[in-house]
Amino acid sequence: MNDILTITHRFIVNPLYRRYNGVDPVVRSPEQRVADRIEFLKRLPLFTHLTDAELTALAKDFTVRRFQQGETIFFQGDPGQALYLIETGRVRIYVQDDGGQETSVIFYSAGDIFGELAAIDGLPRSASAIAADETTVHVLSRERLRAHLLTSPQLAYNFMQALAVRVRYSTLQVGSLTLHDVPSRLARKLLELAQGYGRVESNGVRIDMPLTQSDLASLIGATRESANKALGNFKRRGLIRIEQNHITIIDPEALREIGS
């Protein structure tokens, strides 16, 4: 069960979250921008072991888009025409039912890709994506992605590995929903977020992203009331601290016990 508590949605735990978030953009020449993008790609697991020629070709095919906080990147049902790679910021992926009720699926941050499924099969988007912060993404069209996968076996292999990790993550999430109660699911989610976004401080591990009760409830498939009750219980027991929508984990071992 401990493996379930340490697997995240990332290909690996991404060191780029802090490196690329909050960096001020600098005016660069086209050649410098390509060189910068190559350096960025080299640090991502998806592009490891590619040749310089392959990295250069990829860097030239990516385009940059910037989104303000709260701006929609794409909607559920839109055509899947591109793959997205986050340089800075955060993106919330969510689904919406016929009544308009939103359920958050996952948050992605610097170094993560998203939109990969529709970019591969060409079917409509299965979820919506919205910028949770001011966000910069690199965009690769479906046609160019396909071309690069056909000409680079290493990229294709890396891509399959990334997809395999996400399938495993989805399987674990389904298992969590069916096998665990709300406090257990919440404890597991907090540990997962701490692993991906945690910042070690003197009195615990601060999850370095704002989270509302609605966000957490949506992420664990629970009502806002039940998530709030579990959060309150954790707080009273001294397991976590909540300050302005930021959560600090004080007793991770107790959370692991609850989530097991």
Image (cartoon, rainbow, N blue to C red):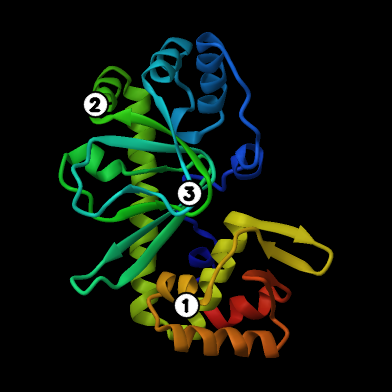
Label 1 sits on a secondary structure element that is helix
Q: Specify the quadrant of the image occupied by residue 163.
A: top left
The kind of residue on which mark 1 rests is Arg
Q: Hey, which residue is sitting farthest left in the picture?
A: 123
> In the depicted view, which residue is nearer to us: 55 or 131?
131
Residue hosting label 2: 146
Q: Nearer the viewer, residue 25 or 160?
A: 25
Report which residue position mark 1 lands on: 185
Q: Amino acid at mark 3?
A: Arg
In the rendering, at what x and y percent does residue 174 appear?
Answer: 33, 70
Name the amino acid, label 2: Arg
Q: Earlier in the sequence, mark 1 or mark 3?
A: 3
Residue at 23% of width from left, 35% of height from top?
81
Gap between marks 1 and 3, in whole Å? 19 Å
Q: Is residue 32 above or below residue 205?
A: above
Residue in the image at 55% along x and 27% along y: 40
Q: Label 3 near label 1: C-beta < 8 Å? A: no
Q: Earlier in the sequence, mark 3 or mark 2?
A: 3
Label drawn at residue 10: 3
In terms of image quadrants, where is residue 65?
top left
145 displayed left or right of 11: left
Residue situated furthest right in the rendering:
202
- Give the CA separation, mark 3 to mark 2: 22 Å
Residue at 58%, 16% in the rendered image: 28
**x then y, percent, for residue 92:** 43, 56
Callout 3: SS: loop
- Nearer to the camera, 27 or 104: 27
User: Label 3 neighbourhood size at 10 Å, few (<14), some (14-19), many (20+)?
Assistant: some
